[in-house]
Image (spheres, coloured by chain):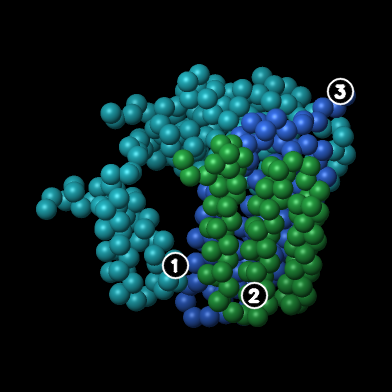
Chain colours: A green, B blue, C cyan
Amino acid sequence: MLTTVIYLSMLMFGISLLLNFFRLLRGPDAVDRILALDTLYINGLALLVIFGLLLNSRLFFEAALLIALFGFFSTVVLCKYLLRGDIIE
Amino acid sequence: MSVWIEYAVAFFLLVGSAFALVGSIGLHRFPDFFMRLHGPAKATTLGVGCVLIASMLYFSSQHEGLHVHELLITLFLMLSAPVSAYMLAKAAVQQQVKTFNRKD
Amino acid sequence: MSRARWLTHPLGSLGLLIVWLLLVDDFTSIGHWLLGGFLGLLIPRLTSTWWPRLPRVRSWKQLFVFSQHMLTDIVVANFQVARLALGRVDNLQPIWIEVPYELESDLAIYLLASAISLAPGTVAASVDRERSLLTVHALHCEDEQALIAEIKQRYEQPLREVFTCLPQ
């Protein structure tokens, strides 16, 4: 039963990734694209964790943690770039 | 693995992916940027949190001992999601993003 | 060396120890407890110049009340966002409101803004330190004053009691 549920939630996360990707392509503003990217990496992280469940492997934890850290920093840096026009002051 | 833990893992996985999907649908459907901000800021955070809880339960029952290191990712997302929402909203206010109004 | 210099931030040291144990995912080995404890003592000491002045927690009971409100509201917020996102989006009436706050420390303002962002229907968008105003975007709101009153009563009131009168 669990395998079916894992495939089902992978499907749902896949649809979420597609919706985020549409928003990333469509825009209309730069902030919309940053928001779409932000959601995209969080959903991608969850998909990676579910893949780890499917393979019964704990190796994906480090990758997921790094995606969370770098994704947050990249969102903040991109917002800073929009706010100031410069990253390093 | 006992049946109850299997049910709990399945429940958290389904609830989590449903919330993440709802957040993404919100991101796709809402008409202006500030409304789109609400979906990812709330639904996606809790959705991914539920998936990580499912993963914690699963690995703690599969392997010897307690494996709760996914808690770190959950806590980090809970702390960082409001900050990134705040930064995005600030950038959008400065960029003068178009807002949606029912009256128009 | 006096105890006060080693344990400049007791909660920070404890937090670092817990983070280290979670990171290596091993609660049984003594070596990791020692290494985590060593890092927990060393890192706050080396970085103590950059730590902001943290307010003292006066009332743990109110902190508990605040976190309880937040946990229930995160779940409520998700169902509300789900209802609004799957329903008719054209009927929504988003508005901007300004919430005056009476908190002083950065940490308390951060907690208030995070609580607002995770609460049902609202996202904090900007903080005005000079006029003590928090600009908040609400997804769907009929009654502006009631929303402001609810935010003040539900989140700011416990926070004000947690961090009363800053030690300067």
- Residue C140's label in the rendered image is none
The residue singled out by tag 3 in the image is B103
The residue singled out by tag 2 in the image is A53
Marked residue chain, label 1: C
The residue singled out by tag 1 in the image is C23
In this rendering, would B15 be left or right of A63?
Answer: right
Amino acid type of the residue tagged 1 in the rendering: Leu
Residue at horizontal 75%, vertical 60%?
Answer: A17
Measured Cα–Cα span from mark 1 to mark 3: 52 Å
Marked residue chain, label 2: A
Residue at horizontal 75%, vertical 68%?
Answer: A10
**Front in this rendered view, residue C81 or B40:** B40
Measured Cα–Cα span from mark 2 to mark 3: 48 Å
> Viewer-nearest of labels 1 and 3?
3
Marked residue chain, label 3: B
Which quadrant: the C terminus of chain C?
top left
Can see residue C102? Answer: yes
Give neighbour class at mark 2: few <14, some 14-19, many 20+ (Cα, 10 Å).
many
Amino acid type of the residue tagged 2 in the rendering: Leu
